[in-house]
Image (cartoon, grey):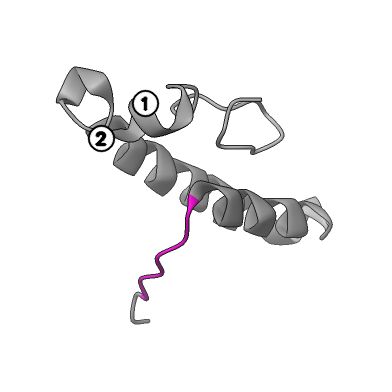
């Protein structure tokens, strides 16, 4: 299967995760995990420790979100 790439901002990614959270867990858990992993990897690459702007734009709370899937860490 071919991979697709999408560009969304953090709020849009959280909205996608919120919508997936309304579906049965057994059906979406692998997809949610995959999206969270990819988002964290990208956000860590742009963190202040890596010399990027992510923490400056978002208060630095993006890298480790709570178990509800929210990437903002709120």
Give the magenta part as a residue range: 4-9
Work out how far the residue at label 1 is from the one at label 2, CA to CA, in angstroms. 8 Å
Q: Quadrant of residue 5?
A: bottom left
Q: Residue 28's spot in the image, x, y percent?
A: 68, 58
Residue 73 % position (x, y) = 59, 26
Residue 24, horizontal then vertical, whole percent: 83, 58
Dot 2, how many residues are within 10 Å of its Cα: few (below 14), some (14-19), or many (20+)? some
Q: Quadrant of residue 3?
A: bottom left
Q: Residue at x 77, y 51 (%)?
A: 21
Q: Magenta: predominant secondary structure element?
A: loop
Quadrant containing the C terminus in the rendered view? top right
Q: Residue furthest bottom?
A: 1
Instruction: Say which of 61 and 65 sits in front.
Output: 61
Mark number, residue 8: none
Residue 69: quarter of image: top right
> Pointers 1 and 2 in contact (CB under 8 A)?
yes
Residue at image mark 2: 46
For disc 1, the marked residue is 55
Residue density around tag 1, few if under 14, some if 14–19, many if 20 or more, within 10 Å: some
Residue at left offset 56%, top offset 54%:
13
């Amino acid at each position: 299967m071919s991979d697709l790439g999408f560009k969304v901002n953090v709020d849009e990614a959280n909205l996608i995760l919120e919508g997936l959270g309304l579906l049965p867990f057994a059906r979406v858990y692998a997809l949610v995990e995959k999206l969270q992993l990819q988002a964290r990897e990208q956000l860590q690459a742009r963190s202040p420790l890596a010399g990027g702007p992510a923490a400056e734009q978002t208060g630095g709370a993006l890298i480790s979100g709570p178990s509800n899937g929210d990437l903002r860490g709120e």
